[in-house]
Image (cartoon, rainbow, N blue to C red):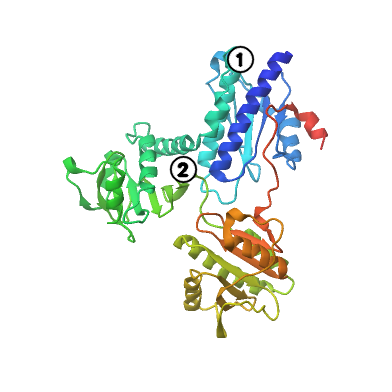
Amino acid sequence: MLTNTHEHFIHRCISDILHGLQEGLSEFSGPSRAAVIYSLTPKSPLFICDPQSLLRGYDPALTNLFIKNSTWRTDGELQNDKARFSHILPEKNLDLDGLITYGGHSGSVFYQTWFTEHHPNICSLGPTERWLEHTVLRFSHDVANEQELYSGISGSFLKEYATHAVRDHLVDECNLHLGLDSTIRIYPVLKALLGISKTMEEGALPQGQLLFVEPRYMQQVSFLAQFHENKRPQLDNSKHVRKLLQSVEDSSNHLVSDGSTIVGICDAKKPDFSFLVEFHGRYGFIKTCENKVCSFSDGRFHSTTNKAKLVEVEEALFEAESVNTDTTHKLFQIIKTLVHNAERSCHGCTLVLDLNSPPLKIPGQTFHTPIALSKKNILALAASFSAVDGALHIGKDCHLHGFSCLLDGLTIPGEDLARGARYNSALRFSKEHKHVIVIVVSSDRPVSVIRNGIEVNGQCAWHAPKSCVFHPVPLTDWLHSL
């Protein structure tokens, strides 16, 4: 039975961790919630702390996993021994749709599982799972230290865990494919690539690919050129490596590194295992075996794929009564092509998808006859037009009716002056015209989908927790309160 003092200490541990975890994951993946289910001893009840209602709607699954099933209580090795706090026996993933989970048993916390959201545009689950894995260790450590030695540092550490999470995942991948004796030190590599990503050359950010190969597998690399061993550029010399990337820009060739120097240049053929860094100007990706691990931009690592999913556009088209299924598919493919082109080209643009019959009259550069976007060469031309100031006007007939169009309208509530004229003009225009979807692509922000004066994908379904200390409740009580 917990005393009031010890109970408050446990609540404080959980609260500090949840705050740090939620803030860190939100920086890494976009707005993210977090929750935990735990039992301190083999005979303790299960408690839940879900301050942002992440697990609401999962009550049938949680009932089956924890109330009707007692396998989570099966330990077999660890007893209530706080000296063994760092010996974590991992629990299998709970496989709940829309969630990423990680749990485990230890000597100080008999059972715990931490939850967060599985965002649809995530590169890989690996770094987030490693983040939650470390969360399990931090909670176990804090409980073992007890109140007298509690520092409260776990939350702060988890808030800044992004680089460590990426490193932990890459180390696991190297150990899996190369064994435990890999000589590539991941932290210096990650620091170097962030430095390179921010280094300008003749006013441009880096483009090109940098391949990291374990030195003992270097003979598998098909080199086009190798640098003299005593004159190899150092990886941490960002300016030098940035200049060398120009030699592989816009080609299938790669710079090759052993983790500390640039060894040479190879063709597209890769060893059995390596990890690849792709630089795409303002952002880039880390890949292992052609699988994206994470992205990076603005000197930080992120989980996002840097591609708009445009789910809101697709849903709006399906809801439109005046557009049949075949036309919906064609319009969506047109919009997707134009948006992704703008993202790759790093320029902003505005697309007005006009579902009215006849289409609206929008001031701008119009054509003698609207041009068909179903033709590849015309779609490529429209992509070029999108770089010109003003909006593209696309009708439900899959034709481009104009470009460099001016979107006007009266001021409305909800405008955001920090977003600039393109965004706010789209809000005003869509408010005054029915059956219109406006897609705003910013050079430095996610894609905005706007209907009826409201940004559809900007509506936040939850708020960051305001309480400093949360109060977990028994899982059975939480389930009965639904």
Say which residue appears at 55% left-offset and 13% top-offset: 83
Q: CA distance from mark 2 to mark 1?
A: 34 Å
Rendered view: 269 above or below 61: below
Of badges 2 and 1, the one in the foreground is 2
**Identity, as a three-letter code, of the amino acid under mark 2:** Arg
Residue highlighted by disc 1: 146
Mark 2 residue crowding within 10 angstroms, few (<14) / some (14–19) / many (20+): some
Rendered view: 51 above or below 283: above
Query: Could you say whether the residue bearing mark 1 is in a helix, strand or loop?
Result: loop
Query: Could you say whether the residue bearing mark 2 is in a helix, strand or loop?
Result: strand
Towards the viewer: 272 or 463: 463
Residue highlighted by disc 2: 300
Towards the viewer: 286 or 235: 235
Say which residue appears at 76% left-offset and 32% top-offset: 68
Whether residue 5 sits left or right of residue 272 in the image: it is right
Q: Can I make out residue 318 in this image?
A: yes
Please report whichever mark, 2 or 1, sits nearer to the chain's N-terminal start.
1
Whether residue 121 sits left or right of residue 74 in the image: it is left
Say which residue appears at 69% left-offset and 55% top-offset: 414
Work out which quarter of the rendered image holds the N terminus and state it.
Answer: top right
Residue 258 place in picture, x, y as percent: 29, 41
Q: Name which quarter of the figure residue 144 lies in.
A: top right
Residue 469 place in picture, x, y as percent: 69, 26
**Identity, as a three-letter code, of the amino acid under mark 1:** Glu
Work out which quarter of the rendered image holds the C terminus and state it.
Answer: top right
Towards the viewer: 42 or 186: 186
Q: Which mark is residue 101?
A: none
Q: Can I make out residue 2 in this image?
A: no
Q: Name which quarter of the figure residue 133 lies in.
A: top right
